[in-house]
Amino acid sequence: MDIDGARIAESVQQLHVRSKATLHDRLHRVRMSLGLALQAGLAAGLSWLAAHELLGNPQPVFAPISAVGTLAASVGQRFRRTVELIVGVAIGVAVGDLIIYFLGTGPWQLGLVVTAAIVLTVFAGASVAIVIQAAATAVLIVTLSPSTENLEIPRFVDAFVGGGIALLVTAVLLPLNPLRVLNRAARPALDLLAAQLDAAADGLRERDRDKVQGALERLRDNKEVLAAFTEAIEGAKETVTLSPARWHRRNELAHYAEAVDPIDRAMRNSGTLIRRAVTLIEDEEAVPDPMPDAVAHLAESVRLLKHEFAVGEEPDKARERSLRAVSEAGRAYAEGVGFSGSVVIAQVRTTASDLLVASGINQEEANRWVRRSFGEQDEAGKPAGQGSAPRPPTAPPVG
């Protein structure tokens, strides 16, 4: 009974822990989406009010639908979504009216309208959003026109009003902080990179092939976080373009935008580093002590870059840690490495260069810093830069 009681208590405790974790995750998702929810609610209400009170539409159903549809678009694509709504409505109205005029209404006419709208928009090379909007509008025209007179003009007006109100809300009335959105989107990508570099460093120290392989597999699953980061950049660009209240953020946004490509390269080069570390362990090559230290310093550089970007500081600490990684890689190379080890060392240098570029240093300068920190031979024939990493030259300001 005591054993059963202990098992029950353990199960209850595990359930309690899982419930707390689930509740925390749900509350976190709610906090992340709260801004969008407030924008959508405000846009829906204002678009209905504008269409009903100002334009005299007695049933402005499509205005709030258009507003919410615009806001539901991927961040950074809302202006385009508004244009797509209007174009889709135009095509749907034209196709629907034409078929009703010649063939009347009915089930088979409805099917023909949807088919024609889709074929026409696809032939014209329209986006998926326009295709869907054209088909949906055509359906509404065919099904509602017999009972609702002059539906076409209100549908056009509602599309304009709803999309315009949505843009007004996001740009003027309730604009989100673009840097906060970017920090939130960048965090998963940078956390993923740092965590797997740390895991690879631990695996190298312990010569644990499975741990390094696991880090490689997790790092490969990065398309979603990078896509979210890139999408957030586009959304922030849209916000600082449309919102006067956010124009002062343009320079800071430019830093983030320029960091996307080098962070992507750092991910890919880190993947090569970790993959070769797996081979190194399998081939039982030497693992000098500075080698895992170099990889761990890369991970810390990523974390520092994330922090300094988030607080708006010059990323000097991240740069110094990247160069420390290169210096440790130089020490490992001097101690002696095999073929796969030399590839790991080369990828430490390349990844460090990527992180320097992400921090705002131009590629040529970043390569020069890396070469200096790695420890090129000086006139006395001794490797320079061994030991603690040199402080980088005064960097040009990120701005």
Image (tube, rainbow, N blue to C red):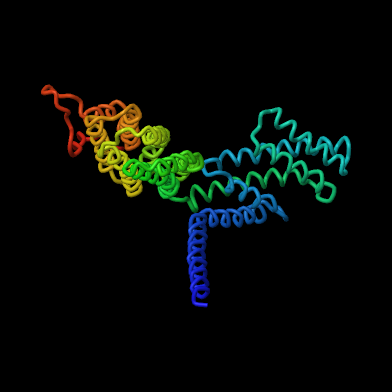
Q: Find residue 154 and report its horizontal and vertical position in percent.
A: 72, 47
Residue at the (58%, 57%) spot, across then down: 41
* 198 displayed left or right of 119: left
Residue at the (68%, 38%) spot, across then down: 88
Up/down of 379 relative to 90, above or below: above
Foreground of the two, 396 or 368 = 368
Residue 266 visible, this orientation: no
Quadrant in the picture for the C terminus: top left
Foreground of the two, 137 or 1 = 1
Q: Find residue 314 and report its horizontal and vertical position in percent.
A: 28, 42
Q: Looking at the rendering, which quadrant does residue 131 occupy? A: top right
**Residue most extreme to the bottom:** 1
Q: Find residue 230 and report its horizontal and vertical position in percent.
A: 47, 39
Foreground of the two, 196 or 6 = 6
Foreground of the two, 343 or 86 = 343
Up/down of 170 relative to 344, above or below: below
Q: How many marks?
A: 0
Q: Find residue 23 and report its horizontal and vertical position in percent.
A: 51, 63
Residue at the (87%, 35%) spot, across then down: 102
Residue at the (48%, 43%) spot, across then down: 225
* 29 displayed left or right of 280: right
Residue 80 visible, this orientation: yes
**Residue most extreme to the left:** 380
Up/down of 116 relative to 170, above or below: above
